[in-house]
Amino acid sequence: MTPFPVRLFATGLCLVSITSRTSRDASASEGGKCTIATKGDTATARACAKGGRADAKKVMKEMVKQAKANGEKFACDSCHKDLDNYELTKNATEDFKKLEAAAPTRLGS
Ligand code: HEC
């Protein structure tokens, strides 16, 4: 049978590796904090403040879905030049108003 201190040590190691792994995944896979929707009171900005890009992405997807249900078609890449840094296209801010109008549910609050 394993002596007690050895078991304790093994348990400790295991816990450390679990916690460090989960925190690293969360920031790397979703790009962490927002860099665009950092102010204002849009649903996206509120989601950013709450849960960073991961939450913003969920809200944007939901808005696009609601707009679609209202007969308005939007695609992520018509407003975002690329989906790694989410840089906005020229028409993005204008179109965002249309998107908000077509997806009136107050999200992320
Ligand atoms: C109609 C234009 C439009 C469409 C379509 C759109 N977005 Fe956005 N998105 C914006 C604008 C404008 C902002 C900045 C909002 C603000 O400043 O409050 C934004 C912000 C974001 C952000 C926050 C980025 C940051 O770093 O601040 C994410 C993430 C995002 N959008 C993901 C998506 C995804 C995923 C889709 C597709 C499901 C999508 N967007 C569709 C216009 C759009």
Image: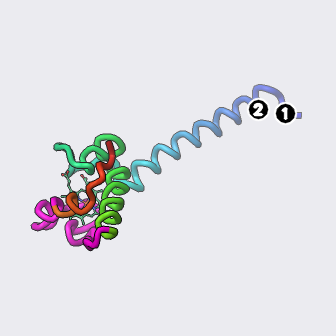
Residue annotated with mark 2: 7
Q: In which quarter of the image is the N terminus?
A: top right
Residue annotated with mark 1: 2
Magenta-span inclusion, residue 87? yes
Residue nearer the viewer, 4 or 72: 72
The type of residue carrying mark 1 is Thr
Left or right of 95? Residue 18 is right
The type of residue carrying mark 2 is Arg
| Res. 80 image quadrant | bottom left
Left or right of 10? Residue 108 is left
Task: Classify 10 Å Cα crowding around label 1: few (below 14), some (14-19), many (20 and above).
Answer: few
Is the residue 74 above or below the residue 56 in the image?
below
Q: In which quarter of the image is the C terminus?
A: top left
Is the residue 18 above or below the residue 77 in the image?
above
- Residue 62 image point, x, y percent: 35, 59
Q: Residue at x 70, y 36 (%)?
A: 10
- Residue 29 image point, x, y percent: 41, 56
| Res. 81 image quadrant | bottom left
Task: Report the Cα–Cα distance between label 2 and label 1.
Answer: 7 Å
Q: What stretch is highlighted in magenta?
A: 70-97
Determine the quadrant in which ligand 1 lies: bottom left
